Amino acid sequence: MWDNHRLLNQIATALYLAAAAAIVYALGMAAIRSPAFALRDVEITGDTAHVSRAQAQALAARELHGTFFTLELEQASATFERLAWVRLARVRRVWPDRLHVTLEEHVPLARWHDKALVNLQGEVFQAVSDARLPTLAGPEGTSAEMARHYAAFRDMLAAVGRTPVEVRLSVRRAWQVTLDDGQVLELGRQDLMPRMARFVAAYRTIVARVPPGARIDLRYENGFAIRQPGLRWGEQPA
């Protein structure tokens, strides 16, 4: 091999190229880590009612590390999403030294077991709110399903001027809805919307005259049963 000058020249050329590539790589890495490419501004946009731009910018100054080229955008997004009320954070680079962050907040739909909140997408999140919100209570992992059913119940009941203030789902998949006048609707485990429609259809002629706080069992095929508060079995309503 040592007598093969052509092969030796090829090996030498390859080594020179490898060394040059290593030098270029090292210089490039040094350049992108250089203070010359430091991030100097973070622009915060989005319709935010609970998160101030000053709060988000302070978080960026405290938590985000790296230059324009080295900052991990996914990690930056996750950092902003740790803020209470922030549902999504979209982060992009703006040449030469700026980050643009668009924040999307949770919009609360209901409370979850009085210990958290549920947003319009049915996602549970931790935040503090003084707003008057209905309560959803069900097994873990059912918040999205309950949010969809709550919205459907709310829309149907609006036709008769009633509002659901609490929706419960048992571990046996039985649904119960409490209305703003205290009436409790037992919907059972199936045919939820037809049963609710039956209640709405009979509301003005029958249910509207029932005292507040009554329990209305809709788990019948063609009707429902009403139990007035304080009435014992065998007694006739006044």
Image (tube, helix red, strand yellow):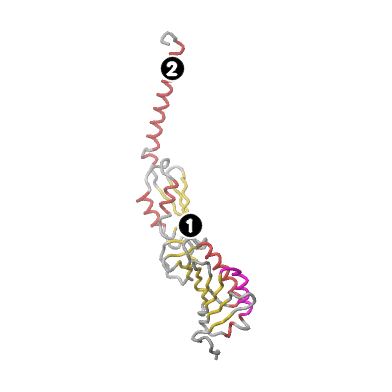
The majority secondary structure of the magenta stretch comes to: helix
What residue is disc 2 on?
11
Is 105 positioned to the left or the right of 62 in the image? right
3 within the magenta span = no
Q: Quadrant of residue 125?
A: bottom left
For badge 2, the amino acid type reads Ile
Which of the two labelled residues, at mark 2 and mark 1, occupies the earlier sequence position? 2
For badge 1, the amino acid type reads Glu
For the magenta stretch, what is the residue range? 189-202
Instruction: In the rendered structure, find residue 104 and report the number of the disc placed on it.
Output: 1
Is 197 positioned to the left or the right of 25 in the image? right
Residue at image position (39%, 45%) is 39
Is 227 positioned to the left or the right of 4 in the image? right
User: In x, y percent, where is residue 27?
Assistant: 39, 31
Vertical relation: 230 (above or below) 95: below
Q: Quadrant of the N terminus?
A: top left
Q: Secondary structure at mark 2?
A: helix
Residue at image position (42%, 62%) is 126
